Amino acid sequence: MSIETEKSRIYYTKPSITDLEIHYATDAAANGWGEHCYEYIDRFERLFREHLGVQHAIATSSGTGALHMGMAALGIGPDDEVILGDINWIASAAPIVHLGAKPILVDVLPDTWCLDPAAVEAAITPRTKAILAVHLYGNLCDMDTLSAIAQKHGLYLIEDAAEAIGSIWHGRRAGSMGVFGAFSFHGTKTITTGEGGVFVTDDDALYERVLTLSNHGRARGESRQFWPERVGFKYKMSNVQAAIGCAQMERIDELIAGKRAIFSMYQNALASVSDRIAMNPENVATQNGYWMPTVVFLSNLTFDRDALLLAFKEDRIDGRVFFWPISDLNIEGIQCRVHTPRAHTLYQRAVNLPSYHNITSDEIERVANLIREFA
Ligand SMILES: *Cc1c(COP(=O)(O)O)cnc(C)c1O
């Protein structure tokens, strides 16, 4: 037997599940059927609306589904173009392709890693229908400038806030500012329902259209049973998932504060190399929900990302690569008309750090120690 005790594995994400989640989920499994089968869903939607400060919320089976239905309800379709950042998870682009429209990838800003408004404006064509503002890793897009561009050119501004619960732009929560917003409650996100998502909007007419779409095309108020008025979708959240979601929403302030505390511990632990790395920014008049603390090694340093990830692995630390530029994935239906040099330097110089709820300060120190060595 080895004398040295094995080091604990440091997970990059892991949900925070307490007795409250277990209690609600158990109750939903035992009692949430028949006439009670929507109770946790209704409650979850209400808690989410209240948290975000929006008029309408529709719980979905995924963030991707929320984006898909919202875009469908806006009439985005064949030959339309939707502009988004080249550094992104495929989930943001997939619904655009599903609708027959074209994702148009543009470069990102060096500090927020989110859409560069100047690149957005340069990419607009007569076919452009929408701008998809993805708040990457909790960092906020420049919503004022993007809103102004959208308004000037008659485009929809959509928010993919899947990673941005807890992020606030000039007093308004991420996801509440666009024509609609989408969130994800996948197991890796700040709050989770296992799988799940939500569509949110302040637009009454858009809400009614998505509600109909989300119910297999059956309109609210239709008195005939099984009478769809159009082909819709089936992206619903179940009552059991919503029960877990209700508990998470009752704990939302604690969960966001936890993510912010983790980020701040990393910031302190990395203060001695702060001239060599950049981390998720929190610009004036904003709050970052810090879903995923990320370190970008500055470009004047030689840095080998794979070597750092290997060092993490040897120390039982889960590291994660920054998203690849989508344009490099060579996927049919996704094109890039312009060079995206910032996206292309960023991904090679960045890693996401473990930030599971309940990570300890010793574990953060172990991660920070390796980063300091590499910096
Ligand atoms: C997680 C995520 C999604 C997709 O959410 P799912 O619930 O997995 O469908 C979409 N966009 C971004 C930016 C995400 O991080």
Image: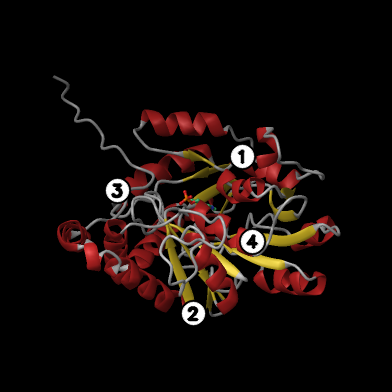
* Sequence-first tag of 3 and 1: 1
* Sequence-first tag of 3 and 2: 2
> Residue 58 shows which numbered tag?
none
Q: Are marks 2 and 4 in contact (CB under 8 Å)?
A: no
- Residue at 67% x, 67% y is 157
Amino acid type at circle 1 is Trp
How packed mark 2 is, by other alpha carbons closer than 10 Å (few <14, some 14-19, many 20 or more), is: some
User: Disc 1 beta carbon < 8 A from ligand 1?
Assistant: no
> Residue 133 shows which numbered tag?
4
Q: Looking at the rendering, which quadrant does residue 238 occupy?
A: bottom left
Which element is circle 2 on? loop
In this image, 123 relative to 29: left or right?
A: right
How packed mark 3 is, by other alpha carbons closer than 10 Å (few <14, some 14-19, many 20 or more), is: few
Q: Are marks 3 and 1 in contact (CB under 8 Å)?
A: no
- Residue at 24% x, 56% y is 17
Residue placed under numbered mark 2 in the picture: 55
CA gap, disc 3 to disc 2? 43 Å
Which element is circle 3 on? helix
Residue placed under numbered mark 3 in the picture: 362
* Sequence-first tag of 4 and 3: 4
Q: Nearer the viewer, residue 286 or 174?
A: 174
Image depth: mark 2 or mark 4 in front: 2
Residue placed under numbered mark 1 in the picture: 324
* Sequence-first tag of 2 and 1: 2
CA gap, disc 2 to disc 1? 35 Å
Residue 357 image point, x, y percent? 32, 55
